[in-house]
Amino acid sequence: MWPVRKNKQDTIRSADTLAMEARGQGLLDKIRTAPHKEPWGITFLMLAWTAGPVTFITAYSAYYIGYGAFPPLDRAIYFLAYALIAGLLGIATKLIYNTTHGHQEKQDEKNLLEVIDCLPELLYMVRDLRLENMGEESRRIESAGIILSKLDLGPAWVALAIEDLTGDAQLARQAEHIELFRRAGLYNRMQDIIHTIREPVGDAYDELRQTHPRIAEAMRQRLTGRVPSVRQGSPREEMFLERILSAIEQDNENLMTLHDVEELLTLCFELICGRRIRYLKYEYSGDWNLARSMDSLEKERNNYRLARARVNSRLRALATYLNYIEPREDINAAPGLSPRHLLTVTLDAMDSLSRQVTECRRITNNTGKQLMALQIKATQLDKAIDLYERAFNAQQKLSRESRRFSRALKVWQLRSKQYEETSGDKVRRSLKISEQSIALDDDDKIKVARQLAQLLEDNRIRRTSDRSMDYTRSSSEKRLTQSRARELAAEIAVILGHSIELNNPAIQRAIDSTPATSLGAIEPGMSPMIKASVGKAMANAVDVSLAAMAERLAQNLIRYYRVPLTRGTMDFLVDTYQANRERLEFIAEHEAPASNQQTRLNRSPIEIPDVHKSWQISLYNARRTLELHA
């Protein structure tokens, strides 16, 4: 028989797969062997064995040089016995070490493989679960947005996503042509098509932006011939860590959304694959009272920014919950929506839920089915009111944090001015900019992988024959639910918190402000080795430029610390962090200290009204009805 000829493309793909698996194995080997290098005691004994004969000859020769005669027999036997015993101890210790820790290395490699393999699969399950609880229209839009976020997207995929987003088959066809010409490098022909569809693209963008701003932007990018970049990564869901940690602290899973769970799984995966998140911070070395004032100012500024973002975070959690209990097309918590929009839709949804409870109570009689329906609706309204009260309280706390921040700012400005007048020195000479990083070293990766592998085992999350995930606590529970997904996120946050200060507002802000590693290139069913290789490549490819952060830092120098932006400071930021010089010059010319901006600081972006009396009355009446029929 003639040998079967392999397709050249298949051969190339197989070679690429083998190469990626080899790189993935190299990453695993590097991580798992790092914590198991021989300690100093073993190294010393090995050296003693290696240098044993040399030690014996040296001692024998030194004795002869010093005393003019060879050592007596008893001392020669002593030197020889020392060398032999030291060597035997070195060999025995090495054998014992390899026997006891060799198994640990294999177990660590297994843990790493399991975690790297399971995290993306679990991420896809949570994402699909999030889509499951949406209305059909929202699910169609979100699914199309997920497709557009993929890096290597074929023309047919682009056309499918555009048609789902716009409902315009002709526009989808043109999107397919744009992608074909882009791939062929025929950019002038691509621009011809872009020019002809400019008006319908603008209309579709304006319509979609009202409810899904981030997906609308992704659609416009595709329809103008621009594709996602590995270096750009993907934007994170703002304040996802704050919501997860608040859900843990307050024992209220509804404060956490499924999108937050996805973000945490992505963060965990990219940190294990070697992602290093860099950020900048101020450091002051000088007068003790001034240093204490600066620490207080930084603390209050962080608390103020956190409180300001928490208002939007609580509204997003409320909108997500309301959409979950009753999927509606007019309410969603899509990334990019303004707090004012979220407040408007949640107020409407709360009024609607309250009316449903009233109507359900009105038609309730002694039948068990109607009583159960009223119980469910009353419980939903109770939880929704609780989430709304948390959003209202978050705004009240924002006002308090704003006042504290204003006081700390006044104290710093007063003391810094007094310091400059009395000492004749400038505060800026003692202010230093330091670069910090958030990452897991090899020891941390091993520890995190061990705990995550145990967590997956305890919850019986495992790979099945078709490479899918099976989540079950018992034989009767085989499906991932929202509650279980949030429980997993809480456990993972606690595990990561042992190695990274996730409770630190500066750490949260640094993570929020940097793009996440794009996992679009990882597909369900890939081998763990390929996932490790792709994950490492993606983590290393994300742009780590600190230019934008350096520019914000320069702005804060003037606004809060009353430190002028000198030519030398601008040169330093440009040379070290590649900041934009023109933007720095604009900041230096137009930015003003915050001493005259207290009224602006005290204003909230929105005003959340108190809980409506009608909601509380509906809930009270429903409870009374349930008590009478109990």
Image (cartoon, grey):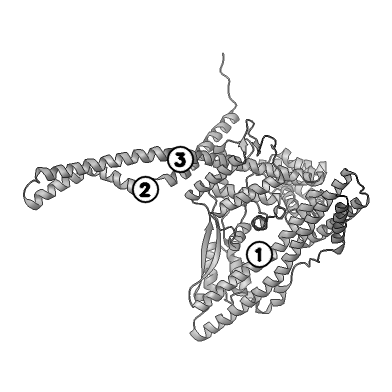
Is residue 512 positioned above or below 457 on the image? Answer: below
Is residue 233 visible in the rendered image? The answer is no
- With 143 as the anchor, is 444 left or right in this view? left
Numbered circle sitting on residue 222? none
Q: Which residue is mark 3?
A: 104
Q: From mark 3 to mark 2, how far is it between C-alphas?
A: 15 Å
214 vs 180, nearest the viewer = 214
At a point 90% along the width and 52% down the height, the residue shown is 361
Which residue reaches farthest left?
68
The local crowd at label 3, few if under 14, some if 14 to 19, many if 20 or more residues have their Cα within 10 Å, is some
Whether pointer 1 and pointer 2 mark residues with C-beta atoms closer than 8 Å, the reply is no
Closer to the eye: label 1 or 3 = 3
Residue type at mark 1: give it. Answer: Leu
Q: Earlier in the sequence, mark 3 or mark 2?
A: 2
Q: Earlier in the sequence, mark 1 or mark 3?
A: 3
Residue 597 percent across, percent down from the top left: 69, 77
- With 466 as the anchor, is 533 left or right in this view? left
Q: From mark 1 to mark 2, how far is it between C-alphas?
A: 44 Å
Q: Which residue is mark 2?
A: 39
Residue 54 percent across, percent down from the top left: 20, 44
At a point 76% along the width and 59% down the height, the residue shown is 386
Closer to the eye: label 1 or 2 = 2
Residue type at mark 3: give it. Answer: Gln
Q: Which residue is mark 1?
A: 306
Is residue 412 visible in the rendered image? The answer is yes
The local crowd at label 2, few if under 14, some if 14 to 19, many if 20 or more residues have their Cα within 10 Å, is few
Looking at the rendered structure, the secondary structure element under dot 1 is: helix
